[in-house]
Image: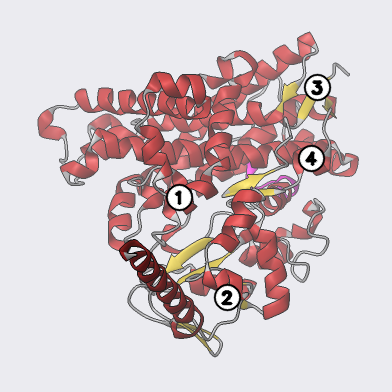
Amino acid sequence: MEYIWLILYALTLLICYTLYGAIKRLYLSPVAHIPGPKLAILSFWYEFYYDVILKGRYTWKIAKLHQQYGPVIRINPFEVHIDDPDFYDEVYVLGSKRKTEKWAWSVPMFGAPNGILATVDHDLHRRRRQPYQNFFSKQSIRKYSNVIQSTADRLCSRLGEHQTLGKKINLMHAWSAFTGDVVTAYSFPRSYGLLDQPEFAPEFFKLWASILSNSHILKQFPWMFPTMQALPERFAEKFLPDLAATYKWQKEWRREIGEIKAGIPSNEKGAGELPAHQEKGNGNIFETVLRSDLPPHERSVERLMEDAQNIVGAGSTTTSSALALATYYIITDPPILDKLMTELKTAMPDPHHEPILPLLELEKLPYLSAVILEVMRISYGASHRLQRVSPEESFRYHNVVLPAGTPVSMSSVLIHDNEGIFPEPREFKPERWLPLETTGAALQKHLVPFSRGSRQCLGMYLAWAELYIGLASVFGRFGGKMRIVDTVRERDVELYHDFFLPAPKVESEGIMMVIDWD
């Protein structure tokens, strides 16, 4: 009988605790005045259903909830989502206006809890970001553009080999190898030579696709990734090949950073000074960070390995996706292809025997610029909502108070697909950005693939440079000879899953292309 009473007592406590939690979330929360579906407010299981069970579909459910509840809504027990493009710059602000932090609940989805992308605290993030800033400035990227161009030349050479053999090209793999070689050449003493590997190193693309497809379940259950990492490597190789691939690349990044660290004299580690060759812009990112004045624990091999995972991943995935989409949309729309080719042929009459225009000159080509702006709109950057927490002060959305400590988010998908700003948003229309100086400049207020504020994407200027140089090189040399094959737009091209970054339907094998001789 005593056991029965103990069970009843425990059940009573559980029921009381559950009721208290429900009442607190519904009526006593600091954001109780903001509307939203009761199930989402009560539990994270609502989001779990759409993002884990349905595989990254909550973004579109949120869009429907806004139609029902208005521009500011609660989408889980703590988070507020806003659908008003004009309010974007009030959420994603510079530190001079308001401190903003990431929401600790959401950062496990990156699988690198100590990396720069997962850094919650505002001041620590700024400290970690500082050694990388100069490498990703517009001026530094212009100096680095010759390496981007040589990588694009190598891509064109490999495409030419496939043309000779009449082989199909997976654009997702080819462009991923291009951006991967660019970012690894910038980060380490040498690139990974992905373009030289068979079929453009598909395992590199699949690594990131695997990590991203698991991002939602890692967010919901943050203990999963550390648990999986504790499994023996041989077990992972046999039963969890995606995890084994992650092990492999993390080993590579540890090795790279360890070798760089071992090559720096002890008196120069943490000195905050660059040797002469790096002052001239010839160094690599992680040698510079290891020489920076970050505290020793911030320069440990293990923590910088996570930064490497962030930088290589972010520096290769979003831009390669945009390049693949641009290639598809240009090839499959003859008027767009004709306009682009006319502009490129005027600027570069013989790209096979003359150098591609310098980056600064490519940026002056209006139609190429319009194409790039449009592909950045339709590829979204990060498709997932980006939460920001203002830890010290409240702010307002019109008459709605957003209390300090509240995770507030917006979504690039909802902004870039806003029909009031971008009519027919799912259609690829570079002309909507022309003329660049007037219409294009006005629309760029609502172009947010890199987010904004103190946590704006570090690699923004690198991405723009890769888009200009990559597209000018490939279309300048192959132009109308490229042809899309074995590709279905609804399955292989259009956004269907939000795995933090945009993804087509899971059954997609990529965007396929062949290059004809005439």
Circle on res. 256: none
Q: In this figure, which residue is indicated by the disc labeled 4?
A: 491
Q: Position of residue 105 (x, y in %)?
A: 42, 59
What residue is drawn where x is 34% and y is 65%?
1
* For residue 203, side relative to residue 16 (left or right): right
4 or 3: tag closer to the N-terminus: 4
Q: Position of residue 304 (x, y in %)?
A: 31, 38
Task: For residue 422, say whether it is visible.
Answer: yes
Q: Residue furthest front?
A: 1
Q: Are marks 4 and 2 in contact (CB under 8 Å)?
A: no
Categorize mark 4 by other alpha carbons within 10 Å: few (<14), some (14-19), many (20+): some
Amino acid type indicated by mark 1? Phe
Q: Is residue 504 above or below residue 219?
A: above
Circle on res. 514: 3
Q: Is residue 420 above or below residue 221?
A: below
Circle on res. 221: 1
* For residue 426, side relative to residue 499 (left or right): right
Element type at mark 4: helix
Q: CA distance from mark 2 to mark 1?
A: 31 Å
Q: Position of residue 270 (x, y in %)?
A: 16, 40
Amino acid type indicated by mark 3? Val
Tell me the mark number nearer the camera, choosing from 4 and 3: 4
